[in-house]
Amino acid sequence: MKILVVEDDDATRSLMAMIIKRQGHETVSAPDGLEGLKTFKTFQPDVVFTDIQMPNMDGLEMLEKIRKLDSNALVIVNSTLDAPQYTLKALRLKANDYLVKPVMEKDIITLLNKYAQVMQSRTRTREVYGLIYQRNLGMKIFNQLDLVCKIVDRLMLETEHALPEQDRLGIHLGLVEMLANAIEHGNLQITYDEKTEALEGASGDWLKLVETRTSTAPYEDRTVNLEFNMSKERCEWLITDQGPGFAWNDIPDPNDPENLLASHGRGIMLTRLQFDECSYLGSGNQVRLVKHLS
């Protein structure tokens, strides 16, 4: 991937660029938002890591201008513990994710791996010969996490010219998050602590944990059912796993900046900001996502 790092702190900027380059990605850097915007136009990156509080042009203003130029680039903001309100504002301006300073190498690598799969699976240019305004689709999805990004890319093809261009990336990432959650935490019943321990452990621990669950009763035979309905007024996705559910009422409210620092529910909070409606049903093993169409 092509990655732009925009950060006014020299040490942080150099460290992030070094970590990203070691992962095999093409990287350029800029010391402030003004230079970052100029570099964005010439470099045309896939991913942007940016600080928020910077001289000349802050990260929020740069983000607004980037979104007018390109709705496909992934933007990840570097936040501080004492200013979560700026992070929430960035997310409302269509930032896709965030890191909390001091930025840790493992967190950068986790996001790079996560979004590399999304970028590799995305179909950016499509030929569309007509406007589809009604669609009903049902899918049975097996516990194959490596196929989630490809499945979502296929789903997004159904919404071509229906969803506004500026919303498509956020919807795409939200569906990836929710399908992965339905498999990992729903069908396979992997807890947040188990996942964290595996990801921070030896290389291959996470893959080993997933393989063990997918080959063990009662998890191995579970599937995720997905129903998609599109009309002129709305797109609706209903995702149902076969796990026991969870205490969904405990998910932090994404509109409270302080909840951005919560250790649990981060992915669901980010997803909720992308949809007009996001509701769990029953015991929590079914989630309904709605995007209204203007």
Image (cartoon, rainbow, N blue to C red):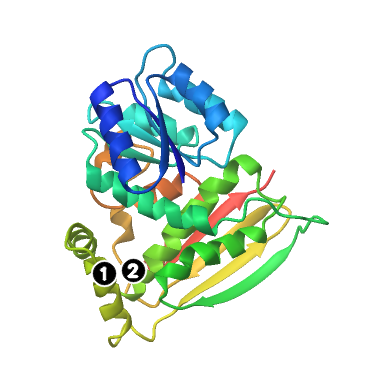
Distance of label 1 from label 2 (alpha carbons): 6 Å
Mark 1 lies on a secondary structure that is loop
Q: Residues within 10 Å of mark 1 (few under 14, many from 20)?
A: some
- Disc 1 + disc 2, Cβ < 8 Å: yes
Provide residue 292's location: percent of width, then percent of height: 62, 48
- Which sits in the foreground, 249 or 75? 75
Q: Count up the numbered dots.
A: 2
- Residue at label 1? 190
Q: Specify the farthest residue to the top.
A: 56
User: For residue 219, what is the image quadrant?
Assistant: bottom left
What residue appears at the point 76 percent right and 55 percent down from the top-left corner? 127
Give amino acid for label 2: Glu
User: For residue 97, what is the image quadrant?
Assistant: top left
What residue appears at the point 43 percent right and 53 percent down from the top-left corner? 116
Indicate the quadrant containing the C terminus: top left, top right, bottom left or bottom right: top right
Provide residue 267's location: percent of width, then percent of height: 36, 52
- Residue at label 2? 184
Mark 2 lies on a secondary structure that is helix
Direction from residue 275 to residue 200 in the image, left or right: left
Provide residue 100's location: percent of width, then percent of height: 26, 36
What residue appears at the point 31 percent right and 85 percent down from the top-left corner? 215
Q: In this rendering, does residue 282 appear at all?
A: no
Q: Residues within 10 Å of mark 2 (few under 14, many from 20)?
A: many
